[in-house]
Image (cartoon, rainbow, N blue to C red):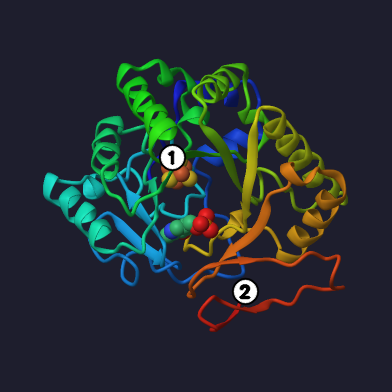
C-alpha cells in the first residue's frame, strides 16, 4: 500500500505526533519472529464475497465495499492488500448485482457501507443510499469512515453535504443510520475534527467509534510502564469520545495480516490493559474488546480478566472451530 498523507495529517506529524506518524508513514519492515502467512486472514475475498464489492459473513449483516479508496492510507489497515487501487471501483452492473443480492437475501436487515471510505467517494455512496432506501428488508444502515480524522475540512464539500442530507433524511424517516468513526489516539481529536463530530450530531445521527490496539500508536513496547502508558492513552481517548457524544463500540486486536506483524500488541498485554480500563471508564465509554478470528468466522469477545487469572490463547469461533492466536 502506497503512502497517502493528507495536509491535515502532515501538519499533525510536523507538530510532533508520534502516534499519527506511526500510523501513516511507511516504516521500514522490522524483523519479527513470526510472519503471518496471508494477506486476507478473514477470508473476505474467497469465502465470503458472493458478488464483487460485497462481504456477507454474518447472516443478518452485509458489508458493501463502496471502493478501495480512502482519504489517507493507514499502514496497519486490514485491507492493505487492496486500499488505494482502482480494482475496487464498482461499475453500474456491480452495483446492481450487490443490490439484487441484498434484495434476494431478505435475512439481511443491516447493511454496512465500508470500503475504502464511503465519504471519500460520496457519489457511489449517494447511489447506494438511494438504492437501499426502498428495500423493505433493510432496516438499519451503518457507515464506517475515517475521513473526519484524515481530512475534517473535506466535510464542507458539496457532495459530502448532499450525502449527509440523505443520511439525515433516512435516519429521521426510514432507517436508523449509525456512523462509525475509526480513532486510535487522542492526537486525532483536533478542534476541526470536533467540529465535524458536532455537525454530525446536530443532524441527529448516532455516532460510534472503533479502535485497534497498535504497537507504536496506543501501546509502546520495551518500556517498564507499557501497560500504564497504554491505559492512560486509551482512557483519554475513550473519555474524550464519550464527552463528544460518540459511543466507543469496538476495540480490535490487530488482524494477522502479512506485513503488519510489527503493529501487533502482545495478547496478554491487551487483556491487562482492558481490565484496568474496566475499572476506570463508565460503561458507555468502554468498548468491547474483540478479535476477528483469523481463519475462522466471527468476532470473538475476549473475556474480562475479572473472571480468569489468565485468558487462554485458544477459543472457538461462531461455527465451533477451535482457533489458536
Ligand atoms: C465486523 C463485521 C461486520 C459487523 O459486525 P458487528 O459485530 O455487527 O459490528 C459485518 N461484516 C463484516 C465482514 C465484518 O467484518
Ligand atoms: S480508513 Fe479504514 S479502510 Fe481506509 S486505510 Fe484506514 S483503516 Fe483502511
172 left or right of 313 in image: left
- Sequence order check, earlier mark of 2 and 1: 1
| Quadrant showing the C terminus | bottom right
Query: Residue 79 sits in which quadrant?
Result: bottom left
Is 289 in front, or is 84? 289
Q: Are marks 2 and 1 in contact (CB under 8 Å)?
A: no
Residue at left offset 63%, top offset 61% = 290
The reply to whether residue 105 is in sight is yes
Q: Is mark 2 within 8 Å of ligand 1?
A: no
Is 159 in front, or is 184? 159
Is 7 in front, or is 126? 126
Q: Is mark 1 within 8 Å of ligand 2?
A: yes
Answer few, some or many: residues within 10 Å of disc 1's Cα (few below 14, many 20 plus, some between 14 and 19). many
Q: How many marks?
A: 2
Label 2, on which residue?
325
Label 1, on which residue?
73
Q: Please, is residue 87 above or below residue 247 in the view?
A: below
Q: Please, is residue 300 above or below residue 163 in the view?
A: below
Answer few, some or many: residues within 10 Å of disc 2's Cα (few below 14, many 20 plus, some between 14 and 19). few
Amino acid at each position: 500500500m502506497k503512502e497517502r498523507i493528507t495536509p491535515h495529517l502532515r501538519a499533525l506529524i510536523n507538530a510532533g505526533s508520534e502516534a499519527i506518524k506511526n500510523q501513516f508513514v511507511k516504516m521500514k519492515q522490522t524483523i519479527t519472529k513470526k510472519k503471518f502467512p496471508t494477506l486476507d486472514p478473514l477470508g473476505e475475498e474467497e469465502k465470503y464475497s458472493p458478488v464483487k464489492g460485497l462481504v456477507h459473513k454474518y447472516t443478518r449483516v452485509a458489508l458493501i465495499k463502496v471502493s478501495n479508496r480512502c482519504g489517507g492510507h493507514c499502514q496497519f489497515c486490514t485491507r492493505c492488500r487492496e486500499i488505494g487501487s482502482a480494482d475496487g471501483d464498482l461499475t453500474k452492473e456491480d452495483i446492481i448485482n450487490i443490490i439484487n443480492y441484498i434484495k434476494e437475501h431478505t435475512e439481511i436487515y443491516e447493511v454496512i457501507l465500508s470500503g475504502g471510505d464511503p465519504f471519500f467517494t460520496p457519489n457511489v455512496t449517494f447511489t447506494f443510499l438511494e438504492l437501499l432506501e426502498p428495500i423493505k428488508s433493510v432496516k438499519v444502515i451503518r457507515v464506517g469512515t475515517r475521513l473526519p480524522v484524515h481530512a475534517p475540512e473535506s466535510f464542507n464539500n458539496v457532495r459530502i453535504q448532499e450525502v449527509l442530507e440523505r443520511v439525515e433524511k433516512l435516519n429521521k424517516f426510514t432507517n436508523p443510520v449509525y456512523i462509525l468513526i475509526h480513532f486510535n489516539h487522542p492526537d486525532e481529536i483536533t478542534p476541526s475534527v470536533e467540529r465535524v463530530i458536532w455537525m454530525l450530531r446536530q443532524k441527529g445521527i448516532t455516532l460510534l467509534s472503533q479502535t485497534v490496539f497498535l504497537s507504536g500508536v496506543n501501546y509502546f513496547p520495551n518500556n517498564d510502564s507499557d501497560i500504564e502508558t497504554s491505559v492512560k492513552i486509551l482512557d483519554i481517548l475513550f473519555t474524550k469520545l464519550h464527552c463528544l457524544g460518540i459511543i466507543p463500540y469496538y476495540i480490535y486486536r490487530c488482524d494477522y495480516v502479512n506485513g503488519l506483524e510489527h503493529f501487533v500488541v502482545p495478547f496478554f498485554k491487551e487483556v491487562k490493559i482492558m481490565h484496568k480500563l474496566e475499572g476506570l471508564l463508565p460503561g458507555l465509554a468502554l468498548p468491547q474488546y474483540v478479535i476477528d478470528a483469523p481463519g475462522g468466522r466471527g468476532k470473538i469477545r475476549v473475556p474480562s480478566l475479572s473472571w480468569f487469572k489468565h485468558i487462554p490463547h485458544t477459543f472457538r469461533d461462531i461455527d465451533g472451530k477451535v482457533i489458536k492466536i
